[in-house]
Every structure is written in C-alpha cells, then in structure tokens.
Image (tube, grey):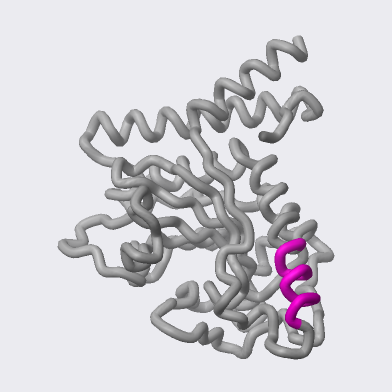
Amino acid sequence: MLDFAHLPRLELERMAAAGQAALDCLKSLAAAGDSVVSKALGSAESFYEWQHYPAGDVYDPRTHAQYYYHAHPPAERGTSEHGHFHAFLRPRGMPAGVQPLMLPELAIPDAPAQPQGPVLPPARQPNQGEDNDKLSHLVAISMDSRGLPIRLFTTNRWVTGETWYGAEDVVRMLDRFAIGTGEPSRPLNAWITAMFTLFRPQMHALLAARDAAIMTWRRRHRGKIHVFEDRRLEVTSAKAIDIEDQVRRIDAALRRAA
C-alpha cells in the first residue's frame, strides 16, 4: 500500500478534490439509474466482446486525450470484471520533450497499428495528421457489474497497438489526460478525468512496474521474440482500487499534515 505521508499538501488537496468530484459523478448517475459504464455503452442494444464503446472512441481535440470501453470474453476477465476503460494520450497533447522509447525491437509499431487477434486498436481520429498517430496508452480501469472501478492495470504494447514511451514520460502525460467534451456523457467524462488525479500515485507506481516487467521479460527471452509482441506477456502491472477507501486515506494524510 502506498504511503501518502510523503506527498505535498497541495497534491493531497488536488487528489481530495478529484475524489469528491469522482464520487459526485457516480452519485448523480446512480440517482438517474445510470453508471459510467451504462453511459459508455449508450443506446447500444447489445454488448459485444472486443467492440469499442462508444463507437469511434471518445476524443477531446483540445487535450488530445482519448478513451474507450470494452470487454474480453468472460474466461479472460475474471468473475468480478464487467469490462474496462483504456485511456490514451496523442502526441499533440504530450509534454514537450517526450520521445518513443527506442529498443532493438522498435517501440514504434507499423502504421496503422495492427495487433493480432480480435483486439481493435484505438480509433484513428479525423483530420489529425500522421504526427498525432503515435499515441501512448496510459492505464486501463477495470469496472465491475455495478459500474464501479475495481482495478488499474497496464499492458504490453501489442494489447492496444500503441507506441511505447518510457514510464517517466508516461507519468508526465497523466496530468494531461482530460476529457472536457459533453459526449457521450459529461458526468462520465468528468469522472474518468478525475480518476487520473485521484489515483496518480498508484498510476505512477504501476507504470514503473510496467517498465520493470518489460525489461525483466526481455532479459529472460533475449533473442527469442520481440518483447512488445510477445502474447505471453499481456498485463504488465495491476492494482486493486476503491474510490471511497482512497478518499479516506487522503483525508487521513491531510489531517496528519495539518
């Protein structure tokens, strides 16, 4: 469990505000009989495995943040998961100076990205230009059947067809993820935006663990297969989460810092 005691008070206050915003979004949706998952699915009459919801993904042309919701077959997602959100940032929204990681295996996939199997890569956005195609996957957020978040996780490159950036660069991207549009749902977009502030310490740790897992795998299998395309390595790091517990821990840290 991460210790919040070392975090600056200002960061704790931002996390606390994000936690309240996330809870408010969930409560307002629940009062209307909805959830962030139902809003992502929208008016779809059927929920199909692998398909992106909403169709074409959600993309903010101001921040260049993007996300979609989907689900794997039941045997691949465990008993508690309904599906998960994948969140990305495109290059025009990235901080200055970040560059794809270059390894002999090449961090940049062929364009367009073509992951093997039924996985669909992030939807390309119109009028973006090739310079905005080398997007980074940030984290995924697993959801249960109630429409509540239960886990954060990171993945190998082949899972989403992303371009690979080092963990420290991706951590810098976390603050840039924001969806300010009204579609498909303003509360959904406000909720997923808030999650990136509320759980930033966990996301930071997961991204560091992601890179460690990739490099460990690469050393073990050197010369046998390209690590970024090895289907045996899918989830590179994961952590269970609970919004209310996170908010309680932040409040406790703020009281100790007072």
Q: Main secondary structure of the magenta part?
A: helix
Task: Note whether residue 186 is visible.
Answer: yes
Q: Position of residue 134 (x, y in %)?
A: 65, 76
User: Residue pushed farthest left?
Assistant: 45
Image quadrant occupied by the N terminus: top right
Q: Position of residue 162 (x, y in %)?
A: 60, 74
At 69% from the left and 40% from the top, the residue drawn is 201
From the viewer's perspective, is residue 244 above or below residue 232?
Answer: above
**In the image: residue 139, left or right of residue 131:** left
**In the image: residue 136, left or right of residue 21:** right
Q: How many numbered marks have been drawn onto this rendered protein structure?
A: 0
Task: Note whether residue 132 is visible.
Answer: no
At 77% from the left and 24% from the top, the residue drawn is 5
At 30% from the left and 46% from the top, the residue drawn is 145
Is residue 4 one of those drawn in magenta? no
Q: Quadrant of residue 62?
A: bottom right
User: Residue pushed farthest right?
Assistant: 97
Specify the segment rendered in magenta.
Answer: 212-221
From the viewer's perspective, is residue 23 above or below residue 107?
Answer: above
At 33% from the left and 53% from the top, the residue drawn is 82
Q: Position of residue 84 (x, y in %)?
A: 42, 56
From the viewer's perspective, is residue 206 above or below residue 124?
Answer: above
Q: Position of residue 3 (x, y in %)?
A: 73, 29
